[in-house]
Image: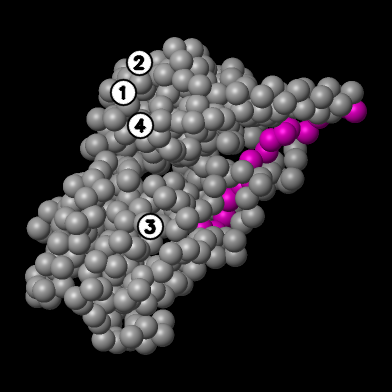
Amino acid sequence: MLRFWGYGDLFRDSAPANGSAEGTLFIDHINTLLSGGAAVAARRLHQGLLQADVGSRLWYSSREALPSEVELATGAGMCAAPWPLVDASIAARSNRIFQEGFRKFHLRLLRNYYRRGRRRRGGGFVGGRQSIKTPFDHAIFDGDIVHFHWVGKLIDFPSFFASMPQERPLVWSLHDMNPMTGGCSHAGDCDGFTRACGDCPILARPGLRDLSNQELTIKHDALRGRRVSVIAPSHWMASMAKKSSLFAECPVSVIRNPIDTSAFYPEDKSLARRSLGLPEDGICLLYAAESVEVNEKGIQEYLEVLRNVSKSRSVFGLVFGRGEIVSQVENARIFSLGYLNSPSKMRTAYSAADIFVIPSHAETISQTTVEAFACGTPSVAFAVGGIPELVRDGETGFLARFKDVAQMTERVDWLIDHPEKRLQMGETAITLVRKEFESSHLISKYIDLYSETLQSLGAVASKRAVEKIAFPS
C-alpha cells in the first residue's frame, strides 16, 4: 500500500481514528475548501456521521490550512488531499514535473484565450481540468462510497475517473450548478447545461465549441457509464439536475444540509448586542456572506436597502464575512465583525439582528439563512434559486423580485413597523429549521441513501458496510 504523510498508518493499519469499528459503513468525502457554504455543509455531514458511528473522512485541498476551530469542531478524519502522489523514482518525479508544467502552460493559454475580453455577463468559471493529474488510488480512497461535494480546482476529471473502478459507488451533493455545467456556478437564464453548453455568456469568446462546451464534454466522458446518486439540498436544485444533460439519467434525492440546533439557537437580543458592542436601540439589519466583496452575494443591494430605510428609520447595519466594505451609508452606521468561523460568535450575531437581509443573486439554499432562522431572525430575500423553499413569504420572512431593491426596502419597512409579526416569523423560522434541517433527523436519510446506492449498484461492499447501515437508536 502506498504510504505518504502517514495516511496509511492513521486510517487503515489499525482501527479508524474516528473510533468507528469493523462492520461500519465508511464514506470518503471530497471538498476543495474548508470555508464557504459547501465546506460548512460537508463538515457538518462528516461530523454527524462520526457521531452516528459511521466511518467518515473529509478530504480537502492541500493548499488549505486547517483552522484550529475546524480541527476542534470536526475531530478526526480531516485529511489534506494526497496529490501529487509520491513518485517511485527520480526519473518518474522529473517526468511528472515536466508534464505538470506543460499541462499548466497549456491550460493557462486555453483559458486566457476564451476568458479575456468583453463578456455578456459576469460570474466565475471553473472547469474540470487541473494542471496536475489527480488519480484515484483505491489504497487511499478505500471507503465504501466516494461522496463528492464542491471539487472545483481540486479534482482533475480525466485522470481521476479514468483510474477509478467503474463499479465504485459515487454520491454527489450539489452545492451549486458547477458539477453539471461547463464552468459556471449558476446558469441563470442560460439553458446550455441542458445540452452541451457552448456559446457561454461568461466567456469573452463564446462559440459552439468554446471552453464551456469542451469542459462539459470532458465531464460527460469522465462519468460515462457510471451511476451517480445525486443529492440536492433544495427542490429547485433537484429540478436543475434533472434538466441537465449530465445528471438527467441519475437518481436525484432532496436531502437538506444538516445543522446542529444545539449550536445555533436564539440568545437574548440585548445581551447579544452588548457583547458585540452594538447599540441597544434601533433596528439591526444583518448581512452575512463568505466574502462581502463578491458582488453576486448582493452587498451593493444590501447597502442600498440600508440607505433607503435609514432615511426615515433608526437603523444600523451589521455585517460579517471576509473582506472590507468599500461603500458607506450616510445615515446609518455599519458594524463589521469580519470573518466568523465560530458557531458561538455567529449565533450571537444572528441573535443581535432584527432582520436578516439576503440580496444574493443566486442560491442553492442559503446556509446563513438557515443559521439565522435557527436563531429566530426572520429575513427578506430575493426570490432566487432555492430561497423560496426557506424564506416562505409571509411566514418566515418576505420575498422580493430579483434585484428589485425598492420592493425589498418595502418588505423591510413592513417588518420594522410590525414587531409582533416579526417575532412570530422568527418563531416560525425556528420551527422550520428544527423540522427540516436538524442534523439528528437528516443523518439517517444520508445513511439510507448510502445503503440504497450500494444495493442499486449491486456493489460488493467491504465487510464494514451494510451490516451497520441502520441509524443507531
The magenta region covers 74-90
Q: Which mark is residue 299?
A: 3
Label 4: few (<14), some (14–19) or many (≥20) C-alpha neighbours in 10 Å = many
Q: Is residue 68 left or right of residue 225?
A: right
Along the line of sight, the residue nearer the viewer: 359 or 342: 359
**Mark 1–mark 4 distance (CA, rounded to whole Å):** 7 Å
Q: Is residue 254 above or below residue 14?
A: above
Q: Is residue 150 above or below residue 114?
A: below
Identified at 32% across, 20% down, the residue is 194
The image position of residue 366, as x and y in percent, is 32, 51
Residue drawn at (11%, 59%) of the image: 395
Tell me the tag on residue 187: 4
Instruction: Report the mark closest to the observer, 3 or 1.
Output: 3
Label located before the other in sequence (3 or 4): 4
The numbered mark at residue 195 is 2
The mark that comes first in sequence, 2 or 3, is 2
Q: Amino acid at mark 1?
A: Asp
Residue marked by disc 1: 191
Residue 366 sits above or below residue 156 on the image: below
Give the residue drawn at x 90%, y 28%.
90
How far across and how far down the image is residue 387, in percent?
24, 48
Based on the displayed image, in which of its 4 quarters is residue 106 positioned? top right
